[in-house]
Amino acid sequence: QVQLQESGPRLVKPSETLSLTCTVSGGSIGTDYWSWIRQSPGKGLEWIGYVYYTGSTSYHPSLESRVTISVDTSKNQFSLNLKSVTAADTAIYYCVRDGSVGVFENWGPGTLVSVSS
Amino acid sequence: DIQMTQSPSSLSASVGDRVTITCQASRDISKYLNWYQQKPGKPPKLLIYDASTLETGVPSRFSGRASGRHFTFIIDNVQPEDFATYYCQEYDNFPLTFGGGTKVDIK
């Protein structure tokens, strides 16, 4: 059974970059699609984007100018960078394995990231 | 973006009841709809994909139906462990979008 675990800073200052890494265990990242999804009280569940193991990506249009998702197959990890954050980016961030594109089969436990000075 | 209108936003039920939740898509999404269950402090869990296919290991009291742009999620004989928040999510179009959620609590 594939397991995912998010890691990274829990507190980010406004205008800085939010960076998270997801470590995949129990399976290879060299298949499937890998997504980031966030959840905030104000906006519910929001898909941020995905990366395929080849490195191809797709992003939510509302975040596309600020987001980069990348994959490191040698480490079995994928990462999220979200730049120029504001308080509106405060949320629980989940890394997720897509069984097929858009079917979110396996989720990390989530990590709460707060944007505050 | 496709809008997923989920209703009700909350409901109360007793153990053994039948619970029905609906999602309406703003345009045609074929069968490309998932249902998730989320308990407090936990990530969502996939229950149903392709509108009506049960994920492996999910009890058969959960079911899903599709009729055009209208989707229904049903829990027959709701059990204590089913009290949670449920979300629909479409995957026919990017960006992928979720419904607003339905909180099911104990009457």
Image: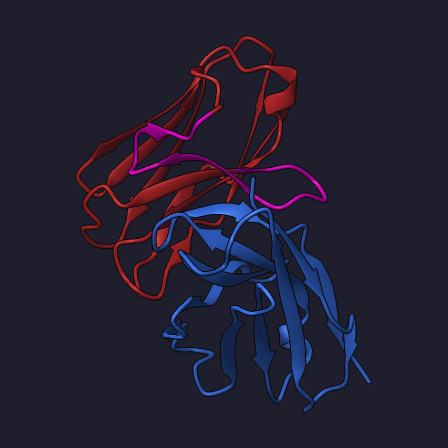
Chain colours: A blue, B red
Between A79 and B45, the one lying in front of the other is A79
Can residue A82 be seen here? The reply is yes
**In the image, is B79 to the left or to the right of B92?**
right
Between A110 and A32, the one lying in front of the other is A32
Above or below A101: residue B107: above
Can residue B107 be seen here? The reply is no
**In the image, is A48 to the left or to the right of A102?**
right
The segment highlighted magenta reads: B37-56
Q: Quadrant of the C terminus of chain B?
A: top right
Above or below B59: residue A12: below
Question: What x and y, as percent, mark residue A83?
Answer: 60, 87
Question: What x and y, as percent, mark residue A102?
Answer: 37, 54
Between A34 and B39, the one lying in front of the other is A34
Q: Residue at x 51, y 55 (%)?
A: A28
Above or below A92: residue B22: above
Q: Residue at x 64, y 21 (%)?
A: B81
Q: Residue at x 64, y 69 (%)?
A: A21
Question: What x and y, as percent, mark residue A79?
Answer: 58, 72
Between A76 and A106, the one lying in front of the other is A76
Q: Residue at x 45, y 14 (%)?
A: B76
**In the image, is B42 to the left or to the right of B78?**
right
Above or below B84: residue B14: above
